[in-house]
Amino acid sequence: MPLGQRAGDKSDSRYCGVEVLDFPAGDGLPAVLTHSLSSAFDFLLAPLVDPDYRPTPGAVLPVAASDLVLSPSQWSSHIVGKISEWIDLDSEDEQLRLDSELTLKQEIAWATHLSLQACVIPPPKRSTCANYARVVNNILQGLTNMQLWLRIPLEKSESMEEDRDKSETVDSWEWWNSFRLLCEHSSQLYVALDILSSLPSMNSLGRWFGEPVRAAILQTDAFLTNARGYPCLSKRHQTLLTGFFNHSVQVIISGRSNHNVSQVSEGVLSRDENHTEDTPTQHALSPYLDYMAYLYQRMDPLPEQERFEINYRDFLQSPLQPLMDNLEAQTYETFEKDTVKYTQYQRAIAKALVDKVSDDEVSTARTVLMVVGAGRGPLVRASLQAAEETGRTLKVYAVEKNPNAVITLHSLIKLEGWESMVTIISSDMRCWDAPEKADILVSELLGSFGDNELSPECLDGAQRFLKPDGISIPSSYTSFIQPVTASKLHNDIKAHKDIAHFETAYVVKLHRVARLAPPQEVFSFAHPNFSPKATNQRYTKLQFELPQDTGSCLVHGFAGYFDAVLYKDVHLGIEPNTCTPNMFSWFPIFFPLRKPIYVPSESPIEVHFWRCCGATKVWYEWALVAPSPSPIHNSNGRSYWVGL
Amino acid sequence: MPLGQRAGDKSDSRYCGVEVLDFPAGDGLPAVLTHSLSSAFDFLLAPLVDPDYRPTPGAVLPVAASDLVLSPSQWSSHIVGKISEWIDLDSEDEQLRLDSELTLKQEIAWATHLSLQACVIPPPKRSTCANYARVVNNILQGLTNMQLWLRIPLEKSESMEEDRDKSETVDSWEWWNSFRLLCEHSSQLYVALDILSSLPSMNSLGRWFGEPVRAAILQTDAFLTNARGYPCLSKRHQTLLTGFFNHSVQVIISGRSNHNVSQVSEGVLSRDENHTEDTPTQHALSPYLDYMAYLYQRMDPLPEQERFEINYRDFLQSPLQPLMDNLEAQTYETFEKDTVKYTQYQRAIAKALVDKVSDDEVSTARTVLMVVGAGRGPLVRASLQAAEETGRTLKVYAVEKNPNAVITLHSLIKLEGWESMVTIISSDMRCWDAPEKADILVSELLGSFGDNELSPECLDGAQRFLKPDGISIPSSYTSFIQPVTASKLHNDIKAHKDIAHFETAYVVKLHRVARLAPPQEVFSFAHPNFSPKATNQRYTKLQFELPQDTGSCLVHGFAGYFDAVLYKDVHLGIEPNTCTPNMFSWFPIFFPLRKPIYVPSESPIEVHFWRCCGATKVWYEWALVAPSPSPIHNSNGRSYWVGL
């Protein structure tokens, strides 16, 4: 049964499994399964084949249980196959290598026959594991549904190579990285992390959140004992497990019980007070499961915004083309619900109104405010509310190019009785001939990367009808990027099998990513800009230094954000360090790399970004320069551009 | 006019150009061209636009000469455009960057209008040249015929970065490498190397023979002065230039004359004694040209074999499938002409016959020899000649699966009157039921990589009818590989735009390649092999160390060879260090890498090769492990295999 109910969270991390250490000979597997399920575990990680087996011609594979002892749905829901651990494909002993290859293929074939969802394959036994990777890669080519989870100890451990200096530590992430590079980032290859009693640094751990980790195999040895004799985890382990729960990673308890507490008398942490009646012999690892349930249930419920966005997690969307295309009603509907955003606009407009018209002039002065890109009117409403709040008199022009939105706008004005204050202009702001000049120009043309929906070009066109001392809201905006590990996004893009999708930026609710260094500024724009030499082309070089204790990592691309100054101290943005809370209009943007780049420990990442402007389109180009040069992405905007 | 005539060599390296240093203002270009051509230069490297020009709105580009002053064929045959050298696309000065971008695009557009074959673009001015590469990459996407030659000084020079330690040296190959990676290995981007007075080490220079070098711009400052006052080059420069001549690289003389020798009185080195009458004022750089002609003409003529193979240089061929397909008459015809090969076979058979039958037994003993894969009979002939030479009596079975070849074989036997000695068997050696057992089994089933045409599988099948003490000729064979830079081959494979062509081995006459480390052994097979555990699967890990003074390099793949022991000390092979001279049956094999790999200076290259055997096919898989892992190539033989 699930570890607990957490509103909105339907991820696999609710389920907890248990590793079967001893080979269940005969038909022992159903009994083990029944016992574990009745002790509230959800599934078994169980050996499929007698570990004493070595291939011999004509021999029948000594499996743990015939396919008939469990129903097909039991096999697929409750059993993760554990491939024999003696397998050593990189041994110097050729016979052992050949036996290992044959056995691995036989066991996987058997697991496929059972329709298992996944098999855990043993950790590489040495730092060079090319032959292991080759055989697994061969197998992966033939799998349709089943996943392989490569078991990797979560540690920086001592080297296993005999000829190396014993004091040298090996970063187990490097094994995983070599293995998956050799297997060409197969989308069916995942990681099962063995959690031991000692943990690497948080920065080192953080890399795994961008990797395809499916399971955390928690060793009983990793537990401490609390004052009452029960198992518990260190603070760092707790933080790590909470991270896994939040990233859809399932826990599997493994090892021998080190805490022989009586379950019957001490039921405090037990979730089901009756279960002892059904199962007279409690599962030896139940105290650990109970602690997992406690950790799971202790987590804060998902915030409403996260719940709303949960189905968008790591789902790649093409950015809007609001200039070329007209938005649909549903899109307006969604964005208009973002009250936080319009509250910020109202605050900014109010401050601008007060600056434009002093309290003494309130009765005589009238401020001309133009909303460019008025849509169905939310900024018109925010402007009028700001005027009311500050007691200023407004004349509003609402300029909108989408004729469908203009229809709604007319109804709104009539419904609200704003006819005397608001003039609706059905026109593209870039070619409208305004009858008078504006004091304040209000727009909401920003994309996830700030300028990526062509706010600069639109406002350059609109500032013709702004007074020389006029105010633009927003008055400036800046884009940001940071390097990320994002294997899920990489694989989704790779599935298109072309270069164009790797040269496109995506709007995406980032979830399974590792953010490797703090975001840095890319491009800035300020409005109005009356300089005759002003250009909207930009070129920025950035260098990212990863925290020293991160270790090496793989960069799949860059996460992008923006921050906008609406007016003076009123800002709006999604840059993680300064983001406006509870705003949902923008997900981050993601710029992929055609080939993920390996960044050795302590090597800086240098990336160059260009914003390029042509006669009919605007586009970005980007390239890595260090640690090694990538091709220039999206040359001439061949794959991705925003139409003018 | 060409530097000279060299039998069989029709490459561009016969032509020598001259760089025009001063901008030919007005309509000076035709006069400069006439003067240079009459002084026996073949073409000019000439500026196209006034170097004082900076873009201004509405300005007309101040070109060196209107397109009308030369005919279209003169423009395209005799002028290589020189792009303005002030262009600096990576300056910190934004205005200079923007001016540079505009001017570069204008000059290239003008050169395209003139139908020039190539333009030389100036060397990067600093070690980071990402913006320069971006603009060139943009231009390359739009070019159809014209080539761009990036000028690179051939040196390990002092760093140009002001903030670096002045004593640090920069390897100019690194600039080229970054530039072409950013430009995605564009097939229209080439190198023009500036040859200065000092040269890097030979290993460092050697890398360039695998790069797309189109021109060597030889500075007059690089010349020495001989005892008679004439320009000459150091031995190392001479070796380098001979290398360029042999690799189709054209020379361009550049600089001011440092040798003011009278051409009229001292005509010893002059190629055309009459030219002084036609051109009263000799070109100031003629003495340098004369020296180039002298160097060119001094080279040994191309050996006959090279001349025969010249049209195959760097041309990728798919390996034969002699087991699945039947060879055609023309293929037999070509291979049968390789007399060196059959002489080696005859020597080996003779030695085996003498070992089998002592001189005392000559009159009584008859040796049973089977030629498996007899084709049209060359090995039958070699066997009978060996028997005659040693006075041994032979009974020959000629086994051949190709019914077409069998027809020719019958005619041959009849024509030569060998009916009593030779029995023809029209059958696949793997299923023939032999009436008696053989003393000697002779075959020629080797491919460029030894076992790649399935000699091991064929001979395993044939050894059923070999006596326990019988001899196989060949008795063993070994494959070899070495890492190479081969940008031409990479680009030819890339043109197919799929992965399969990057996972295929090719037979190719390697020419424009840099061999980066000595070849090492890969797989060995010995025959006969009666061991019950014998397998033809193989797995080999190799580590290559590049000479320390090479510097960094790019590896596009591995060149493969074989060496075979026919019998005792008689061998046959194409491994460069031990190859049999004047044999033309085999070109090397080339195993590409899907993505060329950058190998930092002094980093070892580790590659793994597998020979895999399935029920119906045999294939190789290969992967780089160091300096960084590649994907496993050709997993499951999905792209390239040899059918059984």
Image: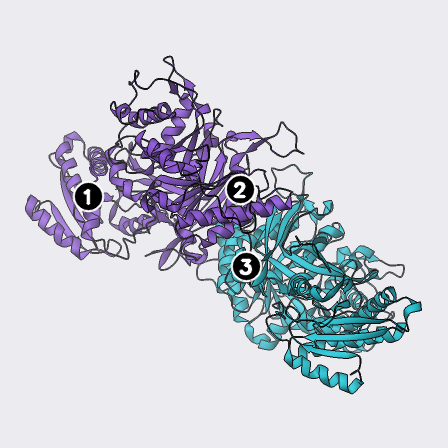
Chain colours: A purple, B cyan
Give the labeled residue for mark 2: A53
Which structural element holds mark 3?
helix
Which structural element holds mark 1?
helix
Tell me, yes or no, if residue A188 can be seen here: no
Depth check: give the residue in front, A585 or A1.
A1
The outermost residue toward the right is B360
Give the amino acid type for the residue marked by disc 3 in the picture: Gly
Please report whichever mark, 2 or 1, sits nearer to the chain's N-terminal start: 2
- Residue A53 on image: x %, y %: 53, 42
Give the labeled residue for mark 1: A336
Separation of marks 3 and 2 at Cα, in angstroms: 29 Å
Q: What chain does badge 2 belong to? A: A
Which structural element holds mark 2?
loop
**How busy is the neighbourhood of tag 3: few (under 14 within 10 Å), some, or many (20 plus)?**
many
Is label 3 in contact with label 2 (beta carbons under 8 Å)?
no
Which residue is found at the position 17% from the left and 39% from the top?
A382
Separation of marks 2 and 1 at Cα, in angstroms: 65 Å
Where residue B637 is drawn, which disc sits there? 3
Q: Is residue B483 above or below residue A194?
A: below
- Residue B507 on image: x %, y %: 65, 66
